[in-house]
Structure formats: structure tokens, C-alpha cells
Image (cartoon, helix red, strand yellow):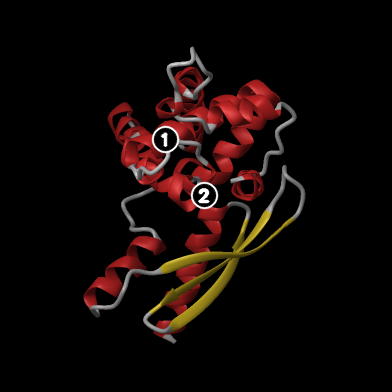
């Protein structure tokens, strides 16, 4: 578990000064015993939910000057729904870092993963302030919140649809390198689909995945 937590800090791009709050953020309420109250991540989940909401709403607002409230609301909902949070937590490989009740599969359920991601963001805000929380949120949500989006499909969606169309397994994205300081990381991602690989870099894991998918599709068309 310690190794998994160290890897998670790398992927987040934030090294916790307060190790206790990091442990609290990754401790599920199912670990509580009859010996008395124990710290778990419910309070940090409450905080992280608000931090994520504010940062993403502000980022979406700043990303465009032409979208109406209704469209911004739909983009916001897509960013913060439980399924999206759980997907991001899985991309970060958060499950192995969680402390849950023994002999259960709680660490691989959408609700537990989504709650843990919120708790970790809350812990980052308490540990490093809003600038640290914003930097991490921008990194792991990536282009979804920072780009002025139109109706065009993103490259990952196009590659996913291609895989479905030709009846092969969904694309698999793997981090093969991460360089640079915490405030300006550079991720290198490999994507494998239909026995073909492509690599690309980006300032966040999500952006690097988009770039890798674009490279894969470009190589296919050429």
C-alpha cells in the first residue's frame, strides 16, 4: 500500500507535507471498528467536492466567452458526475492506495473511488492551498475543462469508436514516463489498440492520452 500511495503522489504531481491528512483521505469508513471513532475520508470528501466544483466551474467559465449557461452546466455535470470521478480515479490507479475493509472489493467500486478522489483533492487543498489544488485538478481533468470545446469528438472518443467498429479490444493507455517539476510536468503516454502502438507527450495525463490517440489515428490514415 505504501508503494501504491507513493505512485499516486507522482501521478497527482503533489507531494504531501502532512502525511496524516493523506492517510485520512485514503481511509474508507468501512475500516472503522467498535474501539471508538477513527479518522476516515468523509469530511475531506465533503471539502473536496466543493473545491473540485469551484475550480472546474471557474475553468469552464474562463475557457470560453460564447457558451451559454445551459451548455456550461452540461459540461460541468459531465466533469463532476460520479462515473467521471471514478474513471479518473482508476486512471490514477487509486484503488491499491485505499485502506478499506479487508476481504472486500470496495476499492474497485465507483462510489468508493469517486469519494476517495474528492477526499484527496480536499486533502491537497488543506495541505498546499488553492494553487496546489487547482494545479492538480487542471492536470488530471486536463483538456476537458481548459479547452474551448465545440461539437467535434475528441481523439480518444474517435479511437474508442474505431476499436468498436473493427471489433477489437478498447484502447489501452499506459504512462511510460513523467518528467519535469510538479508545477510543469510532461507525461509520455503509450496507447495500444489493434496490435498497434503510438506514443505522445502532454502537460497532463489526459492531454497526453488525447495526443497519443491523435497520433495513432494519424498513423492509421497515413
Q: Residue furthest top?
A: 36
Task: Tell me if residue 193 comes above or below residue 66 in the rendering.
Answer: below
- Find numbered disc 2 in the image and state the secondary structure of the residue it sits on: loop
Quick one: 185 or 106, which is closer to the camera?
Answer: 106
207 shown above or below 124: below
Q: Is residue 124 in view from this perspective?
A: no
Q: Nearer the viewer, residue 151 or 41?
A: 41
Q: Residue 82 shows which numbered tag? A: none
Label 1 residue SS = loop
Give the answer, above or below, for where 126 lies relative to 4: above
Residue 61 x %, y %: 46, 30
Compare marks 1 and 2 and give the one earlier in the sequence.
Answer: 2
Estimate how packed mark 2 is, as few (under 14), some (14 to 19) or many (20 or more) residues with alpha carbons within 10 Å.
some
Q: Is residue 194 left or right of residue 176?
A: left
Along the viewing direction, whichever of 78 and 122 lies nearer the viewer: 122
Q: Residues within 10 Å of mark 1 (few under 14, many from 20)?
A: some
Q: Distance from label 1 to label 2 (Cα)?
A: 21 Å
Report the residue at 44% width, 87% height from top.
222
Q: In the rendered image, is residue 215 in sight?
A: yes
Residue at 44% x, 50% y is 90
Instruction: Please give the name of the residue rendered at 61% of the width and 64% of the height, measured from the top-left corner.
Output: 201
Give the labeled residue for mark 2: 92
* Viewer-nearest residue: 51 or 74: 51
Give the number of the mark in front: 1 or 2: 1
Q: Which residue is mark 1?
A: 101
> Where in the figure is residue 97, as x and y percent of width and height?
54, 43
Q: Residue 95: x, y in percent?
A: 47, 46
Amino acid at each position: 500500500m505504501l508503494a501504491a500511495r507513493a505512485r499516486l503522489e507522482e501521478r497527482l504531481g503533489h507531494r504531501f507535507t502532512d502525511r496524516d491528512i493523506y492517510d485520512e483521505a485514503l481511509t474508507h469508513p468501512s475500516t472503522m471498528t467498535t474501539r471508538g471513532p477513527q479518522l476516515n475520508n468523509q469530511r475531506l470528501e465533503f471539502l473536496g467536492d466543493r473545491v473540485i466544483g469551484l475550480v472546474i466551474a471557474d475553468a469552464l467559465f474562463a475557457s470560453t466567452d460564447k457558451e451559454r449557461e445551459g451548455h456550461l452546466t452540461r459540461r460541468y455535470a459531465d466533469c463532476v458526475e460520479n462515473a467521471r470521478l471514478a474513471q479518473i480515479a482508476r486512471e490514477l490507479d487509486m484503488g491499491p492506495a485505499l485502506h478499506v475493509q479487508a476481504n472486500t472489493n470496495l476499492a474497485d467500486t465507483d462510489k468508493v473511488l469517486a469519494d476517495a478522489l474528492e477526499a484527496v483533492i480536499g486533502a491537497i487543498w488543506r495541505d498546499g492551498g488553492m494553487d496546489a489544488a487547482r494545479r492538480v485538478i487542471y492536470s488530471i481533468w486536463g483538456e476537458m475543462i481548459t479547452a474551448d470545446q465545440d461539437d467535434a469528438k475528441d481523439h480518444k472518443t474517435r479511437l474508442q469508436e474505431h476499436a468498436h467498429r473493427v471489433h477489437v479490444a478498447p484502447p489501452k493507455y499506459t504512462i511510460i514516463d513523467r518528467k519535469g517539476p510538479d508545477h510543469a510536468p510532461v507525461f509520455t503516454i503509450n496507447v495500444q489498440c489493434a496490435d498497434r502502438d503510438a506514443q505522445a507527450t502532454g502537460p497532463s495525463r489526459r492531454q497526453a492520452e488525447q495526443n497519443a490517440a491523435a497520433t495513432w489515428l494519424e498513423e492509421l490514415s497515413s
